[in-house]
Image (spheres, grey):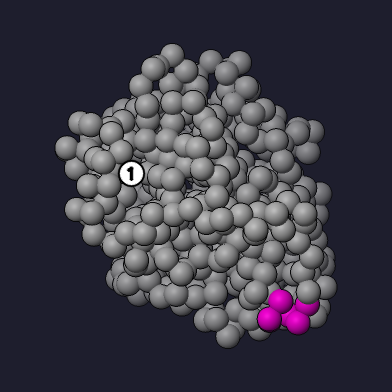
Amino acid sequence: MELYSTNNKHLKVSLEQAVMRSLAPDKGLYMPDSIPELNPSFIQHLDRFSFQEIAFEVCKSLMKGAIPLANIREIIDDSINFPAPVVMLDDNIGSLELWHGPSMAFKDFGACFMAALMAYFIRNEDKKHTILVATSGDTGGAVASGFYDKPGIEVIILYPSGKVSDLQEKQLTTLGKNITALEINGTFDDCQALVKEAFNDHDLNNRFHLSSANSINIARLIPQSFYYFEAYKQVMHLHKHLVFSVPSGNFGNLTAGLLAKRMGLPVSRFIAATNSNHIFPDFLNTGVYDPKPAIATISNAMDVGDPSNFVRIQDMYDRDLSAIQKDVSGFWLNDEETRAAMIDAFSKYNYVCDPHGAIAYKALRSLSDDELGIFLETAHPCKFQDVVEDTLNHKMELSSDLLTLMTKTKNAVSMEADFSSFKSYLLSRQ
């Protein structure tokens, strides 16, 4: 398997190089040199395969010998060991629940797979690798859980102060050991910019073996494609045109869905569901990509003003706006409308959506009779307990594990959104 940079298709690297480097030296993102189409017979008989078997077939086809098949099976068995059930609300709408993993967010799929894959790549090394990751909420907890106590790897998580939920903050600031949290006085875009600048700093790259666990890393996208196949498997007997409504922030989740479609998954269309940070829906309407500073909302994981994976989507469609529009439409809600969507799902179906899933749910309001809409419920509602309880007037019961987590002491390093301060901090850790 070879991958190229979105800035230069002639700049090609191996899967190991792409995963361990994360970002291309020309600041592009890595994409597979070719996206294979799965055997149509396999797609037609998905209901005969387990989730893990589906993941293996996708990896085997996409990775093309980059890793021995036996090791691919071990990586999948080690990481894709929790379900992704589709819960039907009525005959035309279902929720793909992606919060059954260790941190109760969809990013567990990517983080756990990536941790297992990196562990395989460095299995014979004695040098330390440093993972830098920016989070607007769920990525931090998933990465912290996935990489916790992995030998040879330290993780530094940057998150925007006051812009993640209490539970999200506890998940990424209380583990210790090889997990360090930096509380940045700024937005998620500030955190993301610091990480990207670190990867382009020659001094840091000469001193550290840097990698990223954000969705700029191709190892995050590959496993996120698995659950689109798994969802189709669960509803294929309904024989309807499938529409996925995807809560979208940095657009890794949507990009993974488009990757699955390219590999042969029969998806009719996608909806990119965003909050007041509606840069991508605006692009679909106007053809102009106009990134802006992120606006804080109650669906904080989507508070992204310059989504990284936009360049991957552009690349997949050769920058053809009309081609993108055939597969993807845009939708967005403000906070007041998001709360109304949460109330609507609860009153109609007694189903509790988190703020992100609620926007994707509402985006399915105009399905045709022959369409089946599946919205991605990307995080357990309890991760947004205050918003959910206040909106629905419904008390959420936390598990004993979560109650214990909330009693733990936060341990984070406060820092301004300034690269010189961030670089000095990294150098001080040597």
Q: Is residue 12 left or right of residue 297?
A: left
Q: Residue at x 44, y 54 (%)?
A: 412
Above-or-below relation of 411 to 262? below
Check disc 1: other Cα within 10 Å, few if <14, some if 14-19, many if 20+: many
Residue 422's x, y, as percent? 26, 51
- Name which residue type carries label 1: Leu
Image mark count: 1
Principal secondary structure, stretch drawn in magenta: helix
Is residue 295 visible in the rendered image? The answer is: yes
* Farthest left residue in view: 203
Secondary structure beneath dot 1 equals: loop
Q: Is residue 28 left or right of residue 65?
A: left
Q: Residue at x 44, y 31 (%)?
A: 153
Residue 155's x, y, as percent? 43, 40
Identify the residue position indicated by label 1 in the image: 29
Q: Is residue 352 left or right of residue 293?
A: right
Residue 116's x, y, as percent? 54, 29
Above-or-below relation of 60 to 47? above
Query: What is the span of residues highlighted in magenta in the rendered image?
Result: 389-394
Tell me the quadrant of the picture where the C terminus can be found.
top left
Q: Is residue 167 magenta?
A: no
Q: Residue at x 63, y 81 (%)?
A: 339
